[in-house]
Structures are given as C-alpha cells and as structure tokens.
Image (tube, rainbow, N blue to C red):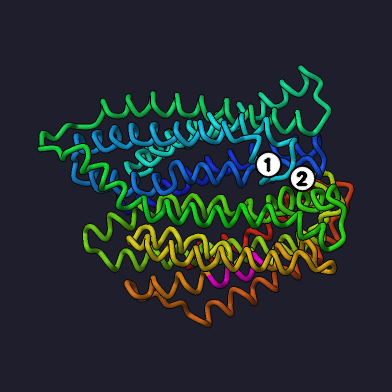
Amino acid sequence: MEKDNFYKNSFLLTLSNLTTGILGFMFSIILSRELGAEGIGLYGLIMPIYNLFICLMCAGVITAISKISAIYFEKNDVLNLKKTIRSTMWFNITWALLIGILVFTFSSYIGTKIIKDVRTINSIKIICPAMIFISLSNILKGYFYGTSKIKIPALIDIFEKGIRISVVICLIRMFNLKDIASTVTTAYIALCIGEFLSLALLFYYYKSSLKSLPVNKTATENSAQLLFDVLVISIPLWMNGIISTTLSAASTLIVPRQLVKAGFQYENALSMIGRFNGMTLNIVFFPMIAVSSISTLLIPDLSQSLYKKDVYSVEKRIKEVIKIAFLLGLSTLIICISIPENLGYMFFKRKDLSEYIRFAALCAPFIYCSSTTYSILNGIGKQNIILRNSLITSTIELVSLYIFTSIKNINIFGYGITIIITSIISLTLNMREINKLCYIRFSVSNIIIYILTGILFYIILFYLNLFIPSNIFLIKNFIMIMVGFSLFLLFTVIN
C-alpha cells in the first residue's frame, strides 16, 4: 500500500462503509417499525451469540491475512500469497463446519437455557450457515485489504446490505408476518442469504484478481508453515475475540435480568434495551464508520512501515488517526446533545430517545479514540497486549453492567456509564503500550482549542435550533448536522 494512497483508500472504504451504514440504518429502521422496541431487543439478544461463534470460527483472520498479504504484495511474492490464502481457507472451512454443526445441534439448549427465550431457537439455527459463510469471506477481505484492492469488498458489502433489506421486506410482505419471533427469524434468513452472496462474489473476484498479479518464480514455503504464520498472528486475536465476545455476550444477556431485578417487567426491559442498544447507539456510533474504515487500512499500513523500519511514518500516522477519531467523536457529541429529539424522531420516528441519545453521546470522543488504538496495536504486532487489555476492559464491563443496571434509578443508563468507563480505561492502557514503541504526544494547548471551539459550535447549534423553523424538519436537521461536522472538517484541513 503506497503511503500516498492511505487516505485515498480510507476515503473509498469510508464512502463504501457509509453507504452500507446507511443501508444498515434502513435495516434497523425497518425492523424497529415491524417489531417495535421489544422485537429489536429480542433481535439484539441473538446477535451476541452470532458474534461469539463467528469469533470462535475466524477471529483475527482478517488482521492476519491483511498483514501477511501486505508484506507478500510488497515483495511481489504472489505464489506464497496464493498458497497462504488456500491453506487458510481449507483450515477455516473445516473448523467452521465443526462449530456450525455443534451450534445447530444445541440450538434449543442455547435458546432456552442461555438466552432464556424460546423465540430465539429458529434464529439460532438460521445463523449457523451464515457464520460459516462469513468465516470464509473474512479471509478474502483480508487479502483485498492487504493488497489495496479496496473497491471490491466495498462494493460487495453494499450489495449484500441491499439484498438483506430487500429480502426482509419481501418475506415480511409475502407471508404477512406479524409476530415477533417470525419476523426476527426472517431478519436472520436475510442475513444468511446476504452472507452467501457476499462470499460467492468475493471468491469470484479473488480468482479474477490473481490473474492480474505478476508471478515471481520464487521458492514457496510449506503449506503448514504458511498456515502457522497466519495462526501466530491470529491466535492471540482469536483468544482475545473469544474472551471479549464471551464477556460481551454475558454482559448483553445479564442486562435484561438485572433490569428485571431492579423492578422492571421483562417486556419493558427488552423495550429499554431495544431503544438504547438497537436505536440510540446506532445513532451515536454511526459516524464511527469513518474511524473503522481508517482503522481497517491502518493495520497493513503500519505493518509495511515497520517492515521498512520507517518509525517516523508510524508515529506520524498514529498521531493523525487518533486526532481524526477524537475530532469526529467531539463533533458527534456536539450534534447529539444539541438536537437529540430531532435525531430520534428523524431516524426512528420516536420521541422517547432524547435522554438516551444525550447521555450515550458523552462516550463518543473516548470510544472513537479507543477503537483506533486496538488497530494500532495490531499494526505494530502487539496482539498479546490486545488480549490482555481486552480481558481487563471486558471484565470491568461485565462487573459495571451487573452493578449499574440493577439500580432502578440508573437502569439502562448503566450501559452508557459502562461504555464511558471501559473506553477511558482501554484508551489509557493501549496508549501506554503504544508509547513504548513510538513517541506519541499531543499538544495540551491544541486539545484545549478543540474543546473551546466545540463549545462555540454547540452554542451556534443551540441558536440555529431556535431560529430555523421546525416546519422544514429534514432541511433543519441536515443544516445542523453539517454545521456540527464542520468542526471536524475545520481542524482536519487546518492541521
């Protein structure tokens, strides 16, 4: 990946992810209107199980393949690159099939004993093939990211999200589905179909892209050795994924229990979770698409710089990315606390999200920065540190959720408190490790200037909200969102 192409590729991936994010938003809006808050809560209870078994199948493989592909691509070693992909594919398909069969077999036990809601059993069965498809897709995505062929997975992701929305709408309308369990199952059927088509297209374009690569007739490594090279990178990330996702799934599953313990009815607890996790966090974390896109390409970029022993470029890139994440998080915070009512109604046609949006937005600058530091640690080869720090923060998350969500006056806001606490802790721990390799320091005066300018933009938005008439609701919201994000653009361009 050429250094000059880093932000160009980041922009292309951000544009793609923005499109898929909008489609994902549409998907969540469609589900919220078909299912209501309780249905969204039920849908959200299954997703951690899905994520957990995906982690078990392939956690770390995108990072490992993208890093190795970037180095082989830099050396023009196409034969070892192809052999690495092939070896990893055969290993993953065997492992993923084994796990998929086990999950399908024990789906009733998972639904009744772990999630404790029988309405989830059919959805758990449906996600089994989807997990196998995505475990193989991740290998191919790692190849495309490592070789800077960003457009291919980007366009396929857009196609997959579009298919998912179309399938959900068609099936719900065709069978006139009304009950929550059937509609949630339909949503996961759409997910499965989308992942299959995504895998098929990725494999087709992978085969096509190989024909355009010049073959350097060098000796190839043994397949077992190449697979071992992948596993050395991915296993610490795999362990991190398993532990973190297990604790995250446990955190998700204990929230409704703790809310019931605090005195809420189970249906009300699911509704609160649906409004906060399924709606509010989608709004607050939507701009994080840009951060995630940059972070994805940051891993092979840093790997290549370290391969060339270019520490200066590593330090410069890390500072740039963390600054971008902070400014984007600050802009998000300002917008969300300025017009929470407008955002809730514009996206979900609900007027009961304002307090949730305003509170959840407080975590934006911290979690945006924190997420980039994990990619930085991946890029500089600190996978064991990621495992340790993730274990610490996930444990704190579980304990915090257990304590805060059981207090009636705090209830679901305990989720927001937990995000703020864990984001600050993970950011602190990760930056401490990054500074052992690179000298990363930020000007305190610049940070103060950013914050003061942020306050100024908040005041501007406050008065715009008063003066722009509400009868042009969408135009008003668009203007205010653009003004809010101009803070991010201002300091990004100036500096």
SS category of the residue bearing label 1: helix
Q: Which residue is mark 2?
A: 347
Q: Residues within 10 Å of mark 1 (few under 14, many from 20)?
A: some
Q: Are marks 2 and 1 in contact (CB under 8 Å)?
A: yes
Above or below, 331 relative to 269: below
Please tell me how many numbered marks the rendered image carries.
2
State the image coordinates of residue 335 (x, y, percent, origin top left): 71, 60
State the image coordinates of residue 368 (x, y, percent, origin top left): 56, 61
State the image coordinates of residue 342 (x, y, percent, origin top left): 81, 53
Q: Residue at x 38, y 58 (%)?
A: 378
Residue reaching furthest to the top: 174
Q: Residue at x 61, y 42 (%)?
A: 21
Which of 451 and 251 lies nearest the eye of the viewer?
Answer: 251
Distance between mark 2 and mark 1 Cα atoms: 8 Å
Above or below, 55 relative to 197: below
Q: Main secondary structure of the magenta part?
A: helix
Q: Amino acid at mark 2?
A: Phe
